[in-house]
Image: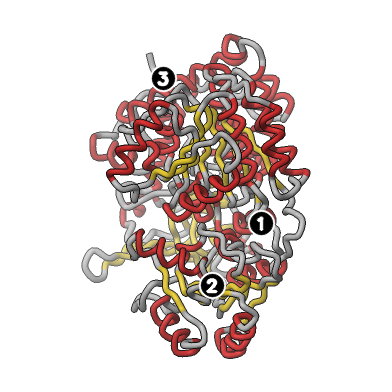
């Protein structure tokens, strides 16, 4: 029986080569083809010659006034000329290049519809194609590649719709279609490909966007529901012991931290699997919230782990947490790739028998030889730096431990809905008392000498400075400052009065760790580095950050770098050095100087650069939607998410008649995706 899941090979003219060409466009079956929508439309409505403007693409309707003349010149080159009689007063010369077969379609006195580019000076038309009629006012333009032309795509879409339109069923349930005034799916697909006019195209596109977002969000909500119902171990933590630990902290928690702690602790006690994202700006106090959550898990008799993206960060967490838990029954251990074999041999049995109940580390925590006695909580720091498989491997250690993912990259609402839609989200939206905003200024490269004087003045007070460059060494491909050249310049300028260090990603881990530790110990007063310090060790004494070629960084990354200073009680500053070449880069610089709010900057970065550039293309978690734009269409995305939540939250939603086509579609596409993987 014919089905939208049939391979495109069932269509006439689609052999193995064309199947392969379509596969390059992610078109494998009939549904893929029918939802391969045009990215724009040409206006094919026949125009009056008086309306025409120079070089506009237009459609003219008339009759062939004279016998067409075909002239051949050069190798395989030809020109077809004829005159088009529009009305009794208007004749337009028409020229087609290298389409000799059109001559047979043009008889004197025959009515034709010609599409082409109008030349106002010559009052002529450079023909592109002859249309079947002037009734179809909109011409669909499809994304194509070198393997398949868009004209072929259009023909295949028409064939698929003719043969399979009766098989197109509504995926968005009727109550939602009525509530949001959406088209039936068959009508939407027709009007996306063959709209009668612009209004029809717009209505179809609006429905297509909602359907696309709704299907995406339905899948996320199913994952979320399964997380909340299929797994989970309630952690009966000791509230008295937990309060004693919180009271021992050397500072009062902010209202935001208290709210987030309550959200996490509520989840820990529930017999469902926690999958929560903790987001907060640089310096907002996420780590202490994670410490409270991990101690809660430990008082419940389980183990906790914290996985960090770098050894430097893992060591910092281990040192800080060991100090925090010095007076409490917590046995902290560090496990990274740098852990010596002898220490590892001693440590692994202690993790396996539960002697060690708090393990800090890198991806070494998920190696097959690492077994946990009873893992209750897994905390993932800077979680977007880990791949999906690494995060899954950590969850699979033990009996589906609760997961708390942390990120200091504030997530705009668009990304929260798409990349993290299956997670519960907690936000720390205030800084601890005493944290001063970082003064940010932007200068041109010809003003650097004055900045060096400012650096010396700051160092003379006993403070330290970071100097960041985008490159490690000189490159012929790009004209940007590099760490090695800046390091040489700063050594010549500052030594022997002040010591200058160099840190970049090509160094071995041991070397990087030593340099970072020496900087923290104030053996270097200036550290020249690449973005390897973006997530790094806290150095409260560092009060000045210089960033060369700042216009080559995104806002979120600049904000992360800026967050390396201002971690102590002293006033701190960030100086952006940039000579932006375009308005977009200028806008990034002015935005940075005007805002210290990571959420504002993240939203702006998303608008300027897109989700893949913020979180990294592979890690962003944001799919390449076909018609919807999660930034520009945030309102539709938000409504679709809420609709998906309500659909899945209804009891036995997948057994209701109105939802059966949706359930069948989700089942079919899930099977297709699994076989493709």
Image coordinates for residue 431, horizontal then vertical, percent: 72, 54
Tell which tag, 3 or 2, sits nearer the viewer: 2
User: In the rendered view, does 398 fall on the left or right side of 85?
Assistant: left
Q: Residue at x 49, y 32 (%)?
A: 357
Instruction: Give the mark nearer the N terminus: 3 vs 2.
Output: 3
Image coordinates for residue 113, horizontal then vertical, percent: 50, 50
Q: Residue at x 50, y 72 (%)?
A: 468
Give the residue pinned by disc 2.
466
Image coordinates for residue 124, horizontal then vertical, percent: 51, 68
Tell me the element at label 2: strand
Give the residue pinned by disc 1.
598
Instruction: Give the mark nearer the N terminus: 1 vs 3.
Output: 3
Give the residue pinned by disc 3.
3
Tell me the element at label 3: loop
| Residue 37 in sight in this render | no
Quadrant containing the N terminus in the rendered view: top left
Tell me the element at label 1: helix
Write down the quadrant of residue 4 in the picture.
Answer: top left
Q: Give the answer, above or below, for where 139 lies relative to 126.
A: above
Q: Residues within 10 Å of mark 2 (few under 14, many from 20)?
A: many
- Near-viewer residue (657 or 486): 486
Q: Residues within 10 Å of mark 1 (few under 14, many from 20)?
A: many
Q: Residue at x 52, y 72 (%)?
A: 522
């Amino acid at each position: 029986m014919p089905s939208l899941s049939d391979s495109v090979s069932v269509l006439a003219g689609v052999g193995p080569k064309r199947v392969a060409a379509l596969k390059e466009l992610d078109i494998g079956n009939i549904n893929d083809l029918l939802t391969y929508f045009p990215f724009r439309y040409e206006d094919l409505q026949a125009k009056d010659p008086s309306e025409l403007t120079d070089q506009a693409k237009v459609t003219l309707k008339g009759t062939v006034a004279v016998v067409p003349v075909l002239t051949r010149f050069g190798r395989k080159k030809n020109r077809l000329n004829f005159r088009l009689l529009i009305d009794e007063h208007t004749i337009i010369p028409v020229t087609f290049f290298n389409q000799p077969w059109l001559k047979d379609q043009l008889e004197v006195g025959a009515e034709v519809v010609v599409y082409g580019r109008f030349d106002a000076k010559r009052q002529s038309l450079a023909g592109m194609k002859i249309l079947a009629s002037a009734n179809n006012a909109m011409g669909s333009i499809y994304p194509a590649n070198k393997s398949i032309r868009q004209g072929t795509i259009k023909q295949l879409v028409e064939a698929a719709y003719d043969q399979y339109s009766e098989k197109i069923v509504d995926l968005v349930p009727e109550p939602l279609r009525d509530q949001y005034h959406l088209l039936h799916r068959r009508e939407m697909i027709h009007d996306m490909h063959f709209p009668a006019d612009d209004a029809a195209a717009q209505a179809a596109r609006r429905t297509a966007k909602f359907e696309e977002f709704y299907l995406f969000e339905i899948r996320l909500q199913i994952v979320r529901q399964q997380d909340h119902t299929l797994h989970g171990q309630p952690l009966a933590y000791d509230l008295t012991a937990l309060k004693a630990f919180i009271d021992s902290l050397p500072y009062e928690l902010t209202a935001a931290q208290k709210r987030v702690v309550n959200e996490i602790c509520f989840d820990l006690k529930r017999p469902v699997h926690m999958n929560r994202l903790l987001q907060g700006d640089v310096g907002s106090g996420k780590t202490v919230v994670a410490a409270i959550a991990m101690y809660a898990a430990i008082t419940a008799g389980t183990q906790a782990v914290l996985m960090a993206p770098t050894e430097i960060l893992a060591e910092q967490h281990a040192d800080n947490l060991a100090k925090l838990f010095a007076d409490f029954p917590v046995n902290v251990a560090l496990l990274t790739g740098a852990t010596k074999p002898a220490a590892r041999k001693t440590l692994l049995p202690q993790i396996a028998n539960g002697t060690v109940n708090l393990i800090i580390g890198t991806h070494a925590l998920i190696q097959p030889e690492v077994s946990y006695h009873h893992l209750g909580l897994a905390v993932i720091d800077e979680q977007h730096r880990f791949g999906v498989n690494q995060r899954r491997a950590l969850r699979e250690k033990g009996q589906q431990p609760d997961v708390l993912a942390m990120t200091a990259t504030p997530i705009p609402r668009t990304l929260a809905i798409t990349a993290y839609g299956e997670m519960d989200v907690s936000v720390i939206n205030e800084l601890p008392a005493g944290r001063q905003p970082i003064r940010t200024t932007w200068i041109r490269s010809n003003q650097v000498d004055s900045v060096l004087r400012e650096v010396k003045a700051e160092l003379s007070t006993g403070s330290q400075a970071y100097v960041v460059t985008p490159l490690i060494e000189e490159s012929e491909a790009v004209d940007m400052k590099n760490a090695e050249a800046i390091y040489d310049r700063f050594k010549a300028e500052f030594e022997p009065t002040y010591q200058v260090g160099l840190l970049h990603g090509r160094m071995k881990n041991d070397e990087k760790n030593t340099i970072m530790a020496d900087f923290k110990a104030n053996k270097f007063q200036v550290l020249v580095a690449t973005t390897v310090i973006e997530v790094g060790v806290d150095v409260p004494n560092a009060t000045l950050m210089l960033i060369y070629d700042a216009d080559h960084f995104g806002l979120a990354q600049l904000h992360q770098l800026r967050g390396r200073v201002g971690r102590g009680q002293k006033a701190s500053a960030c100086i952006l050095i940039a000579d932006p070449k375009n308005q977009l880069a200028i806008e990034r610089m002015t935005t940075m100087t005007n805002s210290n709010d990571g959420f504002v900057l993240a939203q702006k970065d998303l608008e300027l650069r897109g989700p893949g550039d913020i979180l990294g293309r592979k890690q962003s978690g944001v799919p390449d939607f076909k018609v919807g734009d999660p930034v520009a269409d945030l309102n539709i995305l938000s409504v679709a998410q809420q609709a998906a939540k309500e659909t899945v939250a209804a009891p036995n939603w997948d057994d209701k008649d109105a939802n059966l086509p949706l359930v069948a579609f989700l089942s079919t596409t899930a099977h297709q995706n699994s076989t493709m993987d």
